[in-house]
Amino acid sequence: MNHYDKLIFVSRSDTATSPMAEAILQKQFYLEDILISSKGLVVLFPEPINPKAEAILASHSLSMKSHMSEQLEEEDFDPRTLILTMDREQKDKLLREHELAQNVFTLAEYIQADEDIPDPYGGSLSDYGRCYDILNGQIARLTYILKAEERTQEEIAKSLQRYY
């Protein structure tokens, strides 16, 4: 099993779905040893989170008000970083444009779900709410998988300690 030091959610602009995913996972996944962030594929200048995305987060007692969009860079790729895109098109673009890309999956692919995360850009507040609901469900499953991977790593370390 893999164990990662960092997890980066990636969306087109890093102003809605990926910061929402970051906020949800930070609330659900309590680990000191994994850095959770979000970045975008096309970020020309830093922008705050979309107001509709922030409103939906606030309705669930979450906030990303201080979030500013950030561009995904080549130095973000390393063997200890898991990169999860919101959909297949974003994953394909990332793999085409970054020679060093590794550990890149769609969120749905990583958790073995059928549904990619829809981009609510330009939609209504209820579209953002539906997006949140899908993210929340998939991140619950992601949390379970990451915690299982962590437990496996701890079990391996404990068993090795017995021999040394």
Image: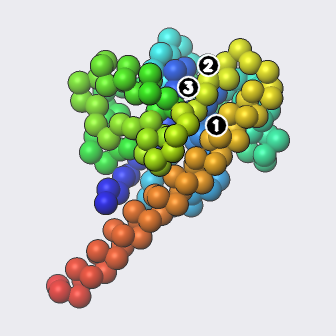
Q: Residues within 10 Å of mark 3 (few under 14, many from 20)?
A: many
The foreground one among 4 and 130 is: 130
The foreground one among 52 and 66 is: 52
The residue furthest bottom is 162
Give the percent coordinates (x, y) of residue 85.
46, 32
Give the percent coordinates (x, y) of residue 17.
61, 31
Give the percent coordinates (x, y) of residue 74.
31, 27
Return the residue at label 2. Answer: 47
Return the residue at label 1. Answer: 20
- x 49%, y 29%: residue: 87
Q: Earlier in the sequence, mark 3 or mark 1?
A: 3
- x 44%, y 65%: residue: 148
Q: Earlier in the sequence, mark 2 or mark 1?
A: 1
Return the residue at label 3. Answer: 14
Q: Could you say whether the residue bearing mark 2 is in a helix, strand or loop?
A: loop
User: Is 48 displayed left or right of 86 in the figure?
Assistant: right
Q: Nearer the viewer, mark 2 or mark 1?
A: 1
The residue furthest top is 44
Q: Which quarter of the figure has residue 28?
A: bottom right
The residues tagged by marks 3 and 1 sit, at their Cα atoms, a distance apart of 9 Å
Image quarter of the N terminus:
bottom left
User: Is 79 displayed left or right of 73 in the figure?
Assistant: left
